[in-house]
Every structure is written in structure tokens, then in C-alpha cells.
Amino acid sequence: MELAGYSCAVAIAKCYPVEAMTKDNHAVLVCCGPGNNGGNGLVCARHLKMFGYKPTIFYPKRPSKPLFDALYQQCEGMDIPVLSFFPSEAHLITDSYNFVVDALFGINFKGPVRPEFEPVIETLKKVESPICSIDVPSGWDIEKGDANGLQPELLISLTAPKLCAHLFKGKHHYLGGRFVPRTLEQKYELNLPPYPGTDCVVELKDTQEDGKA
Amino acid sequence: MDRINVSRLSFRRKVSHKKDKHRHELSDNSSEDIPRIKYISQTEAQNIDQELFTEYAFSVDQLMELAGYSCAVAIAKCYPIEEMTKDNHAVLVCCGPGNNGGDGLVCARHLKMFGYKPTIFYPKRPSKPLFDALYQQCEGMDMPVLSFFPSEAHLITDSYNFVVDALFGFSFKAPVRPEFEPVMETLKKIEAPICSIDVPSGWDVEKGDPNGLQPELLISLTAPKQCARLFKGKHHYLGGRFVPRTLEQKYELNLPPYPGTDCVVELKQDTQEDGTA
């Protein structure tokens, strides 16, 4: 989770360099869901803070597990503010945040979106700031996507891209989570591209539209 | 409602364009008052570690992962893989019985991901789940483990492009245990570069050891230790980019800014010889 969240922060910083983030002194919003994708978001937020961004967290449903308690406490220790409620209108988000990190749902998601998250997703669809989705655009069917769902501008696939990433139509697609042992990669025939040097992310090109690799 | 704790908002230092100097934002006597990076004592190192785990709720394996990763990155900057011509990028990673050894295991794993060919020497494995897991992760990456340490220095020099010294860290107190003595003595004679993690192994954490290991690269973690003032090697890097601002301020670490998203920053060698910062 630490390596995954860190690589998300690095990919985000590549696409949205901190100097170019002019709203409210590099302010960004990180929306964290109730599972591991949310945990990745918390790690990502912490590293974005180290990189000089000003993250605010939205974390409505915190799982009562030590791992997530600790991640949350680490964010508190970094003076990262936490929203008590989600802004009711999309333009409030667009005005305040340079981009939104979508760490709501990941590979374990099965539709439909729970009632408490519905308004969040609906508002995010209307936000005009770029959305950076961790691993899977939240709410998408992991394999078939969702033509009416969130349309992130950046997708950071972790470990390997999921089938739905074929339908990703945003600007930047990165792969992160550089920890796959060679034997595991071979077992699943992942055919991962080489990561440049010591980078923890690699940009993926040409994975859209007709579904061909 | 935002829960920004105003009392903990820090005075934001502006990063100057000079690469490795700190300047106060609006200081009048900026030429005299540049806060230099702090070289910490053994007690401070132990206390900072403890606070990271208690007050700041980090887990040991979390920070060990970031620390070991930054060591691998610093090593790769100084010894680029294309230049490591011995035996197809072969390197040796010597891991001690404590957390420094754990950092070494993480480092070895990332070096493997970067394309190096690490071999591990890990004579005294602590029986704790964390270290068992780290060891198993290395096995899963097909990393060979030496059963015994090569008896002669030239064997190491001939086979390995460099040696990562992850034997002892900031908790070390002399003397070196008997089982590690021969290892240290052999390492002192090898001609391949040594990259020490956090503290050159065997050095007094504050006073150093002129007769001890002389690494070519030192990667200080979190903050440099006092003995780093006596480091005479070629490259000194700082890694472990996870120190919360309030902790940094509490101990007045004056850490230099890390470039962009880098997890390491080079510390330049203007701290040697007379020990003044």
C-alpha cells in the first residue's frame, strides 16, 4: 500500500507539477473510500504533502482496522485537514482544488455504489478540475467500465492495468506499484513494460478504444 | 468544517534557488543565519524513531520500506547499472541482525527491480515476523543468499561491483560481536566501493572510527548522525523522506529540500574534517 500510494503521488506530480497548481496554494482534494483503495489514497495524500501540495482528505467511511487507523493518524500528524462533509456543489470543488484524487473504489468494487457514496460520485462527475483515479475509475465495472461513470483525466493502474482501462479516455495513463516479482509476472503473463531506471511509475500509451493492447 | 489545527501550522520556509542552502524567508542577516542541517546524536536518533512509531503512528515496516527504497535509489544514482560491469551487475548486500539489516533486505529487493543482481549475506536472522517476511520477499525475487562470508577480500572485489553495508545502524554500541568481526575485517580490505546504510557499520554513531570501514557512499536516513561529519567518502545522500514537518521542527533538523518527488537528496561535503557543520 505504501509503494502503491507513493507511486500514485509520483504519477500525479508528473502530470500536475506542483508549480502549475495555482489554486489556493497547491490545494488538492483526496477522496478515500472504505477499503484498500481508500488506504492507497491516504498514503498518496501523505506523499503529495511531502511533495509540496496541500491535500485535504474526504474519508466518510473509515474501516475499524489498525492499518487504516494508523494511515489516518499519519495524515493527521502531517497536518492534513479532513472534511466533515462533502461539498454539495461541484463548482465549490472546482474553485478550491487543482485536482481531485479519486481513491474511492478499487478492484473489489461490485455495483451499485452504496447510498452514502452516490452523491459524492454524482458531484465528482460534474467537477471541472481534473480527476486522478487510483487503479480503477471509481464506480466502473472492473472489466466493462462505465460509459456514464466518472471520467478521470489521469488513471494510475496499480500492479497491472485492469480490463476496464481499455475504455479509459483520459489524458494520462500510468502504471505504478513496481513490486511484482518476475516469477509472478510470468505466471500471469502480465508482460509489464520496463520501468525507466529507478522510476516507480511508467506511462502506458495506446490502451484505448478498441480494446487492443 | 476544516480541521486545520492552527497552532501546528508551520512557518513556511521559501526554498531558495541555491541548491543546498536554507534561507529564512525574510531574514535580514541571511548571510550569517543560514540554518545548517543538524547532525543528530544516538539518543536523538532513537527518540525520533520512537516518536515516528508512537506519536505519528508509522509502522516499522512502512518506514523500513521507504528507507530501503531510498537507499536503492541513492545507490543507483552513484553506481548506475550500465556501469556495473562485473558479472552482469552483481552486488553484495550484507545485512546485520537488526533494523539496519532490514533496511538492507528492502534495498536489495529494489536493487533487483532496478536490474542489479544482488546476493545477500545474512548470518544472524532475528526471529521476528517482519524480518522473516522481508527475507521471504527476497527469496521470492530469486535472490541468492550466501551460506558463509568469502574468506578473502579479493574474492569479493572480483565478484561484486559494490557492497551494501547494512550491518549495523544507529543503535550500535561497540564492540562488534565476535561473529561479525571477520566480516568487518574483510570488508575493510576490499577494493569494491562500499555503500553504508545510515551509519558506516562499526563506527561509534557520534564519534566515528578512523580505523573502521571507509565507505564510498553513505546514505543517511531521516537525518545524518554526528559521525557523518567524519565521513570521507565520495557521496553522501539523505533518504527517508517521511519526516513530518512538526517532528522536523521539534528536533530542529533543518533538513534540506528534496528535489521534486525524489526520495533522496545529496548532501554536499562541506561538513568534513574539523567537524563543524
Image (spheres, coloured by chain):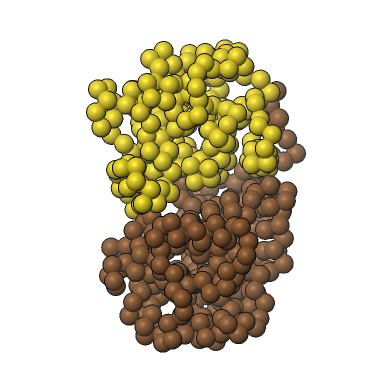
Chain colours: A yellow, B brown
Residue beneath the point at 56% across and 14% down? A118
Q: Nearer the viewer, residue A24 or A209?
A: A209
- State the image coordinates of residue A121 (x, y, percent, origin top left): 52, 17
Q: Nearer the viewer, residue A181 or B1?
A: A181
Q: Is residue A62 left or right of residue B76?
A: right
Res B154 → quadrant: bottom left
Residue beneath the point at 33% across and 77% down? B159
- State the image coordinates of residue B46 (x, y, percent, origin top left): 69, 63
Res B144 → quadrant: bottom left
Residue beneath the point at 53% across and 45% down? A2
Residue beneath the point at 68% across and 23% down? A84
- State the image coordinates of residue B17 (x, y, percent, origin top left): 47, 50
Q: Residue furthest front?
A: A187
- State the image coordinates of residue A187 (x, y, percent, origin top left): 34, 46
Observer able to see residue B23: no
Observer able to see residue A118: yes
Q: Residue furthest right?
A: B7
All told, the count of numbered labels is 0
Screen quadrant of the C terminus of chain A: top left
Say above or below: A99 vs A75.
above
Q: Is residue B119 left or right of residue A114?
A: left
Say above or below: B4 vs B49.
above
Q: Nearer the viewer, residue B157 or A55?
A: B157
Q: Nearer the viewer, residue B86 or B225?
A: B86
